[in-house]
Amino acid sequence: MPAFDLDQPLIELASQTERGYWTIRHAVEGVQIFGGIGSGKTSGSGRMLALKYLASGFGGLVLTVKPDEKQAWQEYCQLTGRERDLIILEPGGPHRFNFLQYESRQAKSALTENIVEVLKTVIRAGEEKDSGKSDDAFWETALDMLIFNVIDLCQLAYGHISVQQMYDIVQTIPKSHEQLQNSPQEGEVKAFQKAFEAARKRVTENMDAWFNALPAAQQTILQNEAAFEAELLHALPQARLLKFLDQFFFDSFINLSEKTRSIIDFTFAGFLFRLLREPVYSLFCRGDSTVTPEDCLNGKIILLNLPVKVYHKVGRDCQILFKYIWQRAMEKRPVNPQARPLFLWADEAQNFLHEHDADYQATARSSRIATVYISQNLPNYYACMGGQKAEFRVKSFLGTLGTKIFHANADIETNKYASELFGEAYFEEESHSVTVSQNFGQTKSKSLKLERMVRPEEFVRLRTGGPLNNFRVEGYLHRQGDALLRGLNHTKMLFNQHYQPSPTR
Ligand SMILES: Nc1ncnc2c1ncn2[C@@H]1O[C@H](COP(=O)(O)OP(=O)(O)OP(=O)(O)O)[C@@H](O)[C@H]1O
Ligand SMILES: [Mg+2]
């Protein structure tokens, strides 16, 4: 494997007197591109960065919103000689990723916790953020507990988990104590009851085996019921688990009000239902995986061709699911000084944010993940990250992306943000004053005035590419940390929509 040097320049910046470099080190500190519709985000700065990353041998993950993104990336890979590294995960294609199987192989010990974490992250990312519900600790806890207990029940009963089993169980959890008492007709034992009986049977068998293996003296002591239970729960974790399941389903969950119950049931079952339908089922829930996040470590580029504009909610759910599993896997990899950088690419990124993104972004640099998020404006992010304190959360998240590129934009909020970010500087101001005492003589004086380096309205006028602009897109690039040029952290740049890469390796 080639060694990767963090100081390798990707973009060279030049002024009349000096040169500056934007390097792989800056790439792995993350990039955010903002710009209005048609401002040149995708075809200007986005395209150039993608080609630079590919030409430098990065592996990566590409999420898609528009149907033409697959073709664009095929072209980028072709231009950089990376066609053979591109893996397209799409309906009807040769690849699939069985996420439950993958997770089961990753972490045997904390399997339930891992799967719960994945499912709840995806479910929450898809919730309406302005309903106020997503910030309600009660809903979240109740939903988490349901997911947790359904997965544990599945595991205990059958020794493995499948989306179909989880769905069937959620659909048939008794709704009331009366329903519980009515014994089912012959042949209509429901999935929930079946699972519970299977779990009970397994625990009973293990319990008998455990008890029979005890020395006779201890068996006598354990004739006492309380002593027996205490010892059993201690010795047999499965028995403890069954007790928890029993308490959850028959004491807590069944007593929730009908409305609460149905919202929680529907949220979880609705999500599972979408996964059970084709084409998603065959891509993410069935068979052996032909592609895993680890492929990127060998330089593969995985593109999820389930564009949100075509597949809507399920396209989004599946991509967030893969993204989150990918982020966790990449964070775990050992990073040595020569490790291959990887990119995480999301155009129209507001579609793919989840609650742990800020945390992952904070450590992305040390795991050499070069995130590129492209979105029109800040309000897009407010709406998606949502809940209370949206503005604060979005801004602190943006703080974890080291480089920002601003293209033409009519959004006042974004332009103000950029202008503030670039800061203020002292400019010389000439003022004229007329003094009466000196026979109307004029004096010119120079004073220093503190002004914005780039005023918010300047972003409205930037060039947006196309034939009229000779295919040049204007943008301001801002990098936090070291200055770029002339002691400044920002510089105005031209991005060529017809940029051609020169492979560096
Ligand atoms: N390959 C290309 N060559 C020349 N011009 C292009 C090309 N792709 C797009 N354009 C034009 O350049 C301008 C910028 O387009 P681009 O798609 O990059 O904008 P964008 O900022 O990504 O917009 P959106 O928010 O709609 O995705 C548009 O006027 C578009 O018509
Ligand atoms: Mg675009």
Image (cartoon, rainbow, N blue to C red):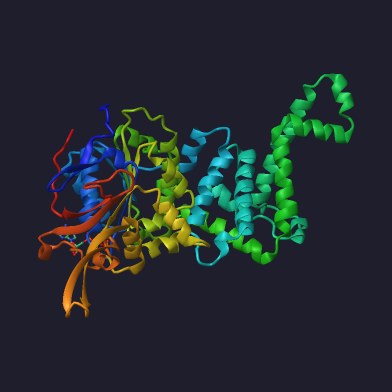
Residue 288 location (% of width, % of height):
42, 37
Above/below status of 81 relative to 311: above
Q: Residue at x 34, y 47 (%)?
A: 402
Residue 106 placement, left or right of 207: left
Residue 162 placement, left or right of 454: right
Above/below status of 76 relative to 173: above
| 254 and 295: which is toward the camera | 295
**Residue 214: in sight, yes or no?**
yes
- When asked about the image quadrant of residue 350, the answer is bottom left
Above/below status of 423 relative to 18: below
Check the picture and name the quadrant holding the N terminus.
top left
| 76 and 489: which is toward the camera | 489
Q: Residue at x 59, y 52 (%)?
A: 168
**Residue 185: in sight, yes or no?**
no
- When asked about the image quadrant of residue 427, the answer is bottom left
Residue 213 location (% of width, % of height):
77, 21
Check the picture and name the quadrant holding the C terminus.
top left
- When asked about the image quadrant of residue 492, the answer is bottom left
| 86 and 492: which is toward the camera | 492
- Looking at the image, how many numbered discs can be counted on the residues? 0
Q: Residue at x 63, y 51 (%)?
A: 146
Above/below status of 463 relative to 335: below
Residue 358 location (% of width, % of height):
45, 49
